[in-house]
Amino acid sequence: MIRTTSEISNENGYKKYNLFEIHEDLEAIIAEDYLLYSSKDFKKESYCELMYKKNFYDKYDENSYKEVYERYINNEKFKEKAKFIYSVIDYDKYVKFVEDNETIEKPNELIISYSIVDSDGVKVNIYNISITDISFVF
């Protein structure tokens, strides 16, 4: 596992950090600016919205896929998770990864774990994303 942290806020000495734990085999698909996620320097909100629109609203007709809309597309928690994936995964690198890896033997082992850690050492796990989750949103 590759483990990286970066400060995302500092309010009167109370700091919060991103903590990413990335399986080595997924390092090749990570965006260059992934450490900016959730910080004041994060600039990919509109990109994430565009990707969500392209991969869900534009692909699925709401009348034909009512259950998909109820379960996924209009589910705010799912939308947040998908936007997180769009924030940290580089689409072009992901496409190359898929081309190079037609079969993945143990997809449940290819995980990206995202947590927030504060200056008191409290760790809150936010997402555990597998390659299956990533492929679903692309």
Image (cartoon, rainbow, N blue to C red):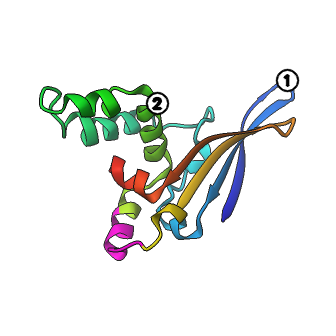
The CA span between labels 2 and 1 is 30 Å
Residue occupying the point 36% across, 76% down: 100
Q: Which residues are magenta?
A: 95-104
State whether residue 3 is above or below residue 12.
below
Residue 136 point in image, percent of width and height: 34, 50
SS at mark 2?
A: helix
Residue 93 colored magenta? no
**In the displayed image of the protein, which residue is found farthest to the top?**
12
Q: Which residue is mark 1?
A: 12
Residue 53 point in image, percent of width and height: 28, 35
Q: Is residue 17 left or right of residue 34?
A: right
Q: Is residue 104 left or right of residue 2?
A: left
Q: Which residue is mark 2?
A: 77
SS at mark 1?
A: loop
State whether residue 127 is above or below residue 68.
below
Residue type highlighted by circle 1: Asn
- Quadrant of residue 1 in the image? bottom right
- Quadrant of residue 104 in the image? bottom left
Majority SS type along the magenta span: helix
- Along the line of sight, which residue is nearer the eye, 100 or 39? 100
State whether residue 111 is above or below residue 56.
below
Residue occupying the point 38% across, 39% down: 47
